[in-house]
Amino acid sequence: MLNKNKNIKKLIANIPNILSISRLFLTFPLIVFLEINRTKFVFALIILGGITDYFDGYFARKLNLKTKFGAIIDPLSDKIFLLIPLLWLCKMGLIPFWSLAIILFRELIISALRTTIKDGLPASQLGKYKTLFFFIALVIFFQPFSKGLLSSLGITFYWLGFILTLITFIDYLRVKKNTI
């Protein structure tokens, strides 16, 4: 009985990381559906990815399960999951290449910094908003209903996420500078 309880506790302790890793695996069907232009399925996967992102953070906070691995894998999963459809939007001419290149540059630098800091450099509140704005932009871009005004709203959320990308990049560099 004691061993069973220990296994259950171990499983519960891994729920946030399991959810983060599941988001990584969602990228494979995401790539396929983007390639064959099945945007309804892309929309559903983005919603599912957003749900897993919310719940991995929720469980990590609620159960006090913050780990260095989680601080690295969760934002890495977010980056991969968000960058793939953003690359597709760039390919389709809906967002400019230069902005995506800056986002990619920031994400690679921050990911490298996370591996060098003891606590994995957890996401700041602004960083969480950045991710939220990109998720909202993607949901709007890939939603299967009328595009019109919603496309403008998607672009607005994209640019809000981009602005927070720049701000949080500067903030993370300040944090890193202070830890050396």
Image (cartoon, rainbow, N blue to C red):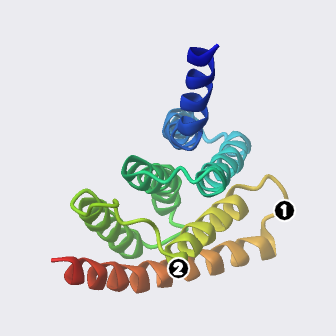
Q: How crowded is the residue under tag 1: few (<14 C-alpha within 10 Å), some, or many (20+)?
A: few
Looking at numbered disc 2 in the image, what kind of residue is underneath it?
Answer: Leu
Numbered badge on residue 146 = 1
Q: Which residue is drawn at 68% across and 46% down?
A: 39
Q: Quadrant of the C terminus?
A: bottom left
The relative height of residue 156 versus residue 6 in the rendered view (above or below) is below
Looking at numbered disc 1 in the image, what kind of residue is underneath it?
Answer: Ser
Which of 68 and 112 lies nearest the eye of the viewer?
A: 68
Q: Quadrant of the N terminus?
A: top right
Read off the residue under disc 2: 126
- Residue 133: percent from the left, percent from the top? 62, 72
Q: Residue at x 40, y 69 (%)?
A: 100
Q: How crowded is the residue under tag 2: few (<14 C-alpha within 10 Å), some, or many (20+)?
A: some
- Residue 117: percent from the left, percent from the top? 25, 63
Quarter of the image where one finds residue 160: bottom right
Which of 15 and 39 lies nearest the eye of the viewer?
A: 15
Q: Which of marks 2 and 1 is nearer the N terminus?
A: 2
Numbered badge on residue 179 = none
The relative height of residue 50 versus residue 4 in the rendered view (above or below) is below
Left or right: residue 65 compared with residue 168 = right
Task: Work out which residue is located at the far left of the displayed protein and give it.
Answer: 180
Q: Distance between the residues labelled 2 and 1?
A: 31 Å
Which of 12 and 26 lies nearest the eye of the viewer?
A: 12
Circle nearer the viewer, 2 or 1 = 2
Q: Which residue is drawn at 68% across and 62% down?
A: 141
Task: Work out which residue is located at the far top of the displayed protein and give it.
Answer: 1
Which of 89 and 169 lies nearest the eye of the viewer?
A: 169
- Residue 51: percent from the left, percent from the top? 70, 49
Quarter of the image where one finds residue 38: top right
Quarter of the image where one finds residue 10: top right
- Residue 119: percent from the left, percent from the top? 34, 61
